Image (cartoon, helix red, strand yellow):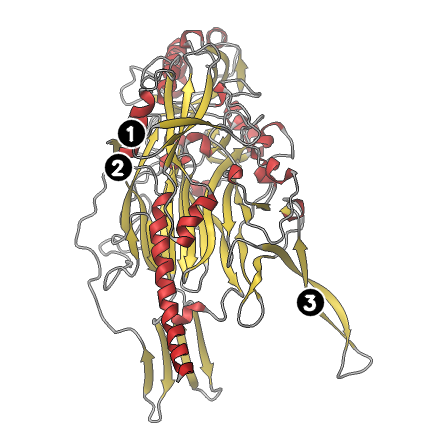
Amino acid sequence: MWSCWGLLICFLAVPASASREREWAHHGASMFADLTPREMRAVRDFLHTQKELGLTLAKGKDLRKNSILLMELQVPRKHEALRALDRGQAKPTRQARVVVQFGNQAEPNITEYIVSPLPYPRSYEVKTFKGSRPIRFESRPITTVEYGHLIKVLAEMAEKARRLLHESTGFTFSDCGDRCLTFSDIAPRGLAPGERRSWIMLQKFVEGYFIHPVGFEVLINHRDLDPEKWAVEKVWYNGQYFDSVEELMEKYDQGTLIKHKLPEHDPSDLYSTFIPRGHSNTPTDIHGPKLVEPQGPRYHVDGNFVEYAGWSFAFRVRSSAGLQIFDLRFNGERVAYEVSLQEALAFYSGDTPAAMQTKYIDAGWAMGTSDFELAPGIDCPEFATFKDMYHYYDTDKPVRYRNALCIFEMTTAMPLRRHFNSNFKGGYNFFAGLENHVLVLRTTSTVYNYDYIWDFHFYQNGVMESRVSATGYIHATFFTPNGLNYGTKVYSYVLGNLHTHLIHYKVDLDVAGRENSFESMELKFVNVSNPWSPGHTIQQSILDKKQHETERSAAFRFGKKFPRYLHFYNPNQENRWGHKKGYRIQFNSHAQSVLPKGWKEEKGISWARYPLAVTRHKDSEATSSSIYTQNDPWEPVVSFEDYIRNNENITDQDLVAWVTVGFLHVPHSEDIPNTATPGNNVGFFLRPFNFFDEDPSLASRSTIIVRPGKEGETKIQRWTPEVIGHCVTDKAFSYNGTYGGV
């Protein structure tokens, strides 16, 4: 009798514990929620009342001003957050990270502050980076006010070259009607720390202007805070360099340079537009297949807290860098404390100065604030849950980005698992299969020409996938014969420049607890004596495990042999079969280094040396990059190499895996008008490796088992009803596309 009561008490304790863990996860999720418009306004108003800061409006035309550049959530320290997540204790005070540009003083600088408590701030303190590196004023991201002054300089320059531009392109920069020129600016802005010189490439201002270069590029020095002192330092026209616009025009008039004339512009035959052209073999009077929710959603969203099929997590979109998830759990057990996008880069090669200088490091463009509206039925299913995002960057009030994030469940049209059990007599013993449903968390970043689609996928068997798909327009320059060494001709005067995309993630794993270790696994061949045939040997593979005990030993360089299994496990926790509970990281990537180690700009992206590096968790090592790296990669504020330089022990520690994925893109004619997503997605999986006793998707009731009956009939065993629900929304497609202050 007593044993029965004991069993009953144990049985009841399990759901009670699970309920408590769920309650704590839900309780703590709001710690990671992005700042609300109310909090943003409160921080702005508080800082503007601090007379010692001397803040003015960011949109003021003067560059000599003190103003707020960026405001976002300051994530709490991990040990403080875990007290709320694991014990249900009070959540730490919400804080804001604020970037202030001080231009109105003798020595202009950038200073970051932590402002608290929210929503009623009363204090601020200086935030420093590891090593207390100062932030050069020249490393700040460019703002709309600075762009306004640049456009003025460009207009003055273009007016001097108006006749050349019109005769060469048929377009001009101002007073141009429907034949206007626009521009793309190139970064980094110089060749050494402290510079602020930008190459600017002129393009036809038409749909898809990124692939309409006109063969005219100009280098502008805009370092001085007085725009009247800005100067054109170099001009490139049709493969030739000039020290000034005046020199260019003098030689143009003298006929001593090589002129060019673009083909006559035909707006009805625009190769960069999405308007359909060519013969279609698909019927146009009917829609293609649609994803549907026959009986409504099977996931739950409450603010930034999501639950689905055993998964739970909190999400945010960091204004500086983008999508993040926190407190990732499966069946109540934490798998990772944080999985977050850190940086994205695209380094180019080319023959024109703009192409050879292009090394885009996208956090420097506030990549997270480029999460524009998602289109239902295209970016996400019509029934998806859409969320608005709010950012405070280069503004004086919060900006709402409508429907910038979506959450939905989908079928992959591929079984999660299946088996046909043949009887080898023309029949079968049974068939069993399970649909593969997955929850998707999605947002996008459109940083200039490229569109990155950021996904986290959550599978029913405890697998999580992080994936980025690249689309949008290629970065194209004016074609020169030598340009074929650096890309592909995609139009009569357009070169698609080769480039490499690299994406960096932080994966703070807490596998069955914070005390984790890391090992890699490979195979090696061994010769063994054949026990059933004396005198013969058998050569076969055995597992070759390597325990990585220090940060340096767990930093794998590109170009070196990379292990196929990367195993993170808890040495103190075992599954039912005596194996250490673990998860592995599996790559989907063909990335390589973009620059030799230590070469100038490469110092700012030292994380790009490693497909994987493993470090001990430190709150002071929160990110691998910063918004300042783009314009000062030579002496970066955040140097990832510092994180592994001290070569700390990583055995039985709180570990962070830093993951680099990417791909080489050699543009081709099929990239016109747009790069398509198939084949252009990379990422990684977090896969359980002895974390469970068996496949946890056995809990799914979507399984179907079919067995043959005695009289030829089939017996179907299922756990979900056969219901045909409402298929497609009856709402017409709508899209707003605007974002603005709130």
Q: Position of residue 653 (x, y in %)?
A: 58, 51
In this picture, residue 107 sits left or right of residue 446 = right
Q: Which of the numbered marks, if any, corresponds to residue 42?
A: 1
Q: Amino acid at mark 2?
A: Gly
* Residue drawn at point x = 53 percent, y = 17 percent: 195
Looking at the image, which is closer to me, 378 or 364? 364
* Residue drawn at point x = 57 percent, y = 55 percent: 516
Which secondary structure lies at badge 2?
loop
Which dot, 1 or 3, sits closer to the camera? Answer: 1
Q: Residue furthest front?
A: 2
Q: Earlier in the sequence, mark 1 or mark 2?
A: 1
As drawn, 586 above or below 680 = below
Tell me if residue 651 can be seen.
Answer: yes
Q: Position of residue 158 (x, y in %)?
A: 39, 13
As drawn, 577 above or below 552 = below
* Residue drawn at point x = 50 percent, y = 62 percent: 688
Tell me if residue 676 can be seen.
Answer: no
Looking at the image, which is closer to me, 558 or 590? 558
Q: Earlier in the sequence, mark 3 or mark 2?
A: 3
Q: Which of the numbered marks, if any, corresponds to residue 737?
A: 2
Looking at the image, which is closer to me, 669 or 94? 94
Q: Amino acid at mark 3?
A: Ile
